[in-house]
């Protein structure tokens, strides 16, 4: 019998009551994911909801995402489209 709540097992509000049961361990913070926690599973690893948000960019980069800084070289001026359209017109003229 518990000395504080005088129950066995302890009432849920008792400081001696056992905490929620561990379900997984968070890959990011290494703390327990317990019953009632929201979590993500990614690539066989488990993350607290808030931890997943904190490391989502890192995970995406590991999965192959590429981060870049836009430059003037990235501007699509449509030249590829114009070239392909003109090429298609010429092929149709030859075949028709």
Image (spheres, helix red, strand yellow):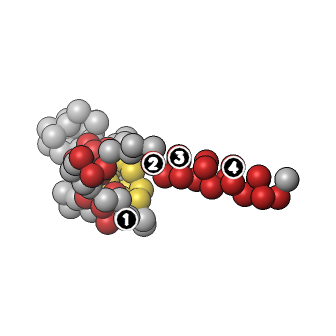
Q: Left or right: 4 with respect to 86?
A: left
Residue found at x 61% / y 48%: 85
Q: Residues within 10 Å of mark 2 (few under 14, many from 20)?
A: few
Q: Position of residue 75 (x, y in %)?
A: 32, 45
Residue found at x 45% / y 44%: 78
Q: Position of residue 91 (x, y in %)?
A: 72, 57
Q: Residue beneath label 4, please?
A: 89
Q: How far apart in space, not on screen, are marks 3 and 4 (Cα)?
A: 11 Å
Q: Left or right: 94 with respect to 88?
A: right
* Label pair 2/3, CB-CB below 8 angstroms: yes
> Looking at the rendering, which quadrant does residue 12 occupy?
top left
Residue 2's place in the image compared with 47, above or below, is: above
Comparing labels 1 and 4, the label whose residue is closer to the camera: 4
* Label pair 3/4, CB-CB below 8 angstroms: no
Q: Which mark is residue 16?
A: none
User: Which badge, 3 or 1, comes first in the chain's sequence?
Assistant: 1
Comparing labels 4 and 2, the label whose residue is closer to the camera: 4
Q: How far apart in space, not on screen, are marks 1 and 4 (Cα)?
A: 38 Å
* Label pair 3/1, CB-CB below 8 angstroms: no
Q: Residue beneath label 3, please?
A: 82
Q: Which mark is residue 64?
A: 1
Q: Which mark is residue 79?
A: 2
Q: Is residue 95 visible?
A: yes
User: Which badge, 4 or 2, comes first in the chain's sequence?
Assistant: 2
């Amino acid at each position: 019998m518990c000395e504080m709540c005088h129950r066995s097992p302890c009432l849920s509000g008792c400081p001696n009551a056992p905490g929620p049961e561990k379900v997984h361990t968070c890959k990011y913070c290494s703390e327990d994911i317990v019953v009632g926690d929201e979590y993500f599973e990614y690539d066989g690893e488990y993350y607290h909801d808030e931890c997943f948000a904190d490391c989502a960019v890192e995970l995406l980069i590991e999965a192959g995402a590429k981060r870049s800084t836009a430059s003037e070289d990235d501007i699509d001026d449509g030249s590829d489209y114009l070239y392909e359209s003109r090429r298609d017109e010429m092929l149709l003229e030859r075949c028709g």
